[in-house]
Amino acid sequence: MIPNLPLRNLLVAGLAGEIAFEAYAWLISPLLFGVALAPANLIVALTKLGFGLEIPYAAGFAVHFTIGALGFSAFVWLTHLVTRTRLVLSGAIAGFVLWFVAQGILAPVVGRSFMMGFGPYTQSSFIGHVGMSMLIGFVLLKLTAAKPLVGNRASVLE
């Protein structure tokens, strides 16, 4: 049985995570790594490659923001259900997977090198994806009643 999680909780957690990601990408990453993260460029390139459509950067940003706010929070929750780990750890695991998909799979699809050579962009992207997903896990933890997932086991939501 899948524990009931209100869609509102996923949306609030996803929005918190995505807003934090964007703040990090544009304000903090340039200070730490000398590069601003712009994942919308990946969406623009994938759309052109997959559909032959040239979309503006703003549309790529909107798509990434929506995927981040809805899809990433759902992925953190799914990771939690599958791994039975605490929500913040589930966020770290999900963030690692999302980072690998972006840098190790999708970036090469659009012609970039594997993990983009593990340079500053990839390193900053790691912090952004893992940090965002851990924040999503934390917000889900705070919004979700700490109930055991199965039987009399101690809560894994803590």
Image (cartoon, helix red, strand yellow):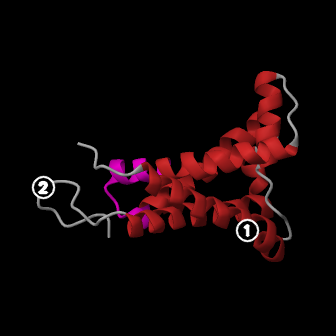
Q: Residue at x 76, y 50 (%)?
A: 39
- Residue 138 highlighted magenta (yes or no): no
- Residue 76 highlighted magenta (yes or no): yes
Q: Which residue type carries mark 1?
A: Ala
Residue 96 visible in the displayed image: yes
Please, what is the dominant secondary structure of the magenta stretch? helix
Horizontal arrangement in the rendering, residue 45 relative to residue 97 (left or right):
right
Horizontal arrangement in the rendering, residue 50 relative to residue 13 (left or right):
right
Residue 121, position as x, y percentages in the image: 78, 60
Q: Quadrant of the N terminus?
A: top left
Q: Which residue type carries mark 2?
A: Gly
* Residue holding disc 1: 23
* Residue holding disc 2: 151
Question: Where are the magenta residues, as a range?
Answer: 75-89
Residue 59, position as x, y percentages in the image: 80, 41
Q: Residue at x 46, y 68 (%)?
A: 138
The reply to whether discs 1 and 2 touch (Cβ–Cβ < 8 Å) is no
Horizontal arrangement in the rendering, residue 59 relative to residue 130 (left or right):
right
Question: What is the secondary structure assignment of the residue under circle 1?
Answer: helix
Residue 120, position as x, y percentages in the image: 79, 64
Disc 1 to disc 2, C-alpha distance: 40 Å
Residue at the bottom extreme? 31
Residue at the top extreme? 52
Front in this rendered view, residue 97 or 18: 18
